[in-house]
Amino acid sequence: MIASAYTIIILFLLFYWGILFWLGRGLTKCAHANQLSSRLPDWPRISVIVSARNEAHNLPRLLHCLQNQAYPAERIEFCIVDDRSSDTSWQILADIQRQNSQFKIFRIDNTLDDYAPKKRALDHAIRAASGELLLLTDADCTPPPGWARSMAQHYQHGVVLVPGYSPYRFDTPMPRLLRGMLALDFFGLAAVAAASIGQGYPTTAAGCNLSYRHDTYFRAGGFEPIRQWVSGDDDLFLLNVAKQKLGRIGYALSPDSFVPCAAPSSWRQFWHQRIRYASKGLHYASPLTFGLSAVYLLNLSLALALPAGMFGFSAYGMFAVMVWIGKVLGEYLFLRKAALLFSEHRLLKYFLPTALIHPFYITLFAFLGSFSQFRWKDEKAPKKQQTETAAHA
């Protein structure tokens, strides 16, 4: 029985190595695709889409960034929805609309039982937008001046959707080690996103830096197939577009396309954010769910090594240490390649402390994402029964 368990764990490790090798190849392909997206033959009309709820403290900075986009003013507009804010967000948005005709401002005052608020707000703005390309970001983000142009450069050769990288921006003081570990963890998600897109099998994206063609949104059915899920306006929509084979999907790697986003400012915010991220795994397609399950079981087996050693199972503890070393080696090689590609090699110095807690981290939040509730914008998200979604195979 014990020998069989060891064999299964080794098979999980080999499978994990295979995934990391496959992802590493994807990074190479993604980098090559970016080299082909260096010219902008014309200036496609762009609509920037933002949903804001109680973001009065972030909106002035975002609006400044949007007005400073290095893109012809007559070819770009900014569609921002105030989603039931109780602070001064609406006043700030109304003022900018009076000052600058590039801004289209909307307000939503209620909710619908079967429509996630953020998706409904985004859908409202998208339907009012006039741009050929839609660029989505969040109110707590700070797009650089070259963002719109850099993202638009990728829309050649049948490309229909392009996510980009959003490094963490730390507005709240915290220890340097913790900042580095959080930044590396978030960067790892972007590395996987770029690598899987490079291989032609997208897995994830972040709504703080996402773009797609206006007609792609409607060809994919908008958010209708996933409208009831509180989260997923980014990765579940991406998976739906990929499933329908609507066109090529790229990933932006130019530093001009990187959109810094605010890191969690408290332990509570981080806790609920990670549960929200993990909760979407229940709605992925079967092959992706299988892969995630295998990775989860590998990390679970390593997380159990500590209590096993405490209860006298020292042989299993030593075995788990060897497996952990193998896991860490594979992860480092992949992240090193990604860090060089994203110019984030400074984050690698935080790799070892992050890798030490990674099995416990994955085990905890994957479990909570399946069975626990989370809060988003100070609202408790209801735990719904699993139903069909467009992400299912």
Image: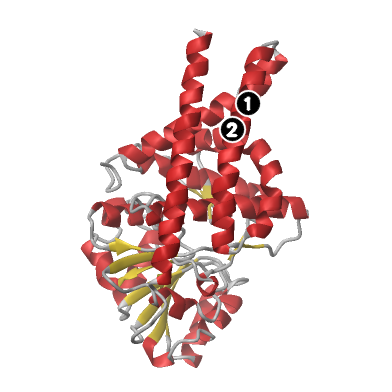
Residue occupying image coordinates x 34% and y 85%: 41
Residue type at mark 1 is Met
Q: What is the x, y in percent for residue 11?
A: 46, 25
Residue occupying image coordinates x 62% and y 23%: 320
Q: Is residue 76 positioned above or below 22 on the image?
A: below
* Residue located beneath label 1 in the image: 322
Q: What is the x, y in percent for residue 386?
A: 33, 37
Describe residue 188's horizontal placement relative to residue 281 as left or right.
right
Q: Residues within 10 Å of mark 1 (few under 14, many from 20)?
A: few
Q: Residue furthest top?
A: 1
Q: Is residue 219 positioned above or below 366 on the image?
A: below
Element assignment for label 1: helix
* Residue located beneath label 2 in the image: 326
Element assignment for label 2: helix
**Which quarter of the rendering shows the C terminus?**
top left
| Mark 1 and mark 2 residues within 8 Å of each other at the beta carbon | yes
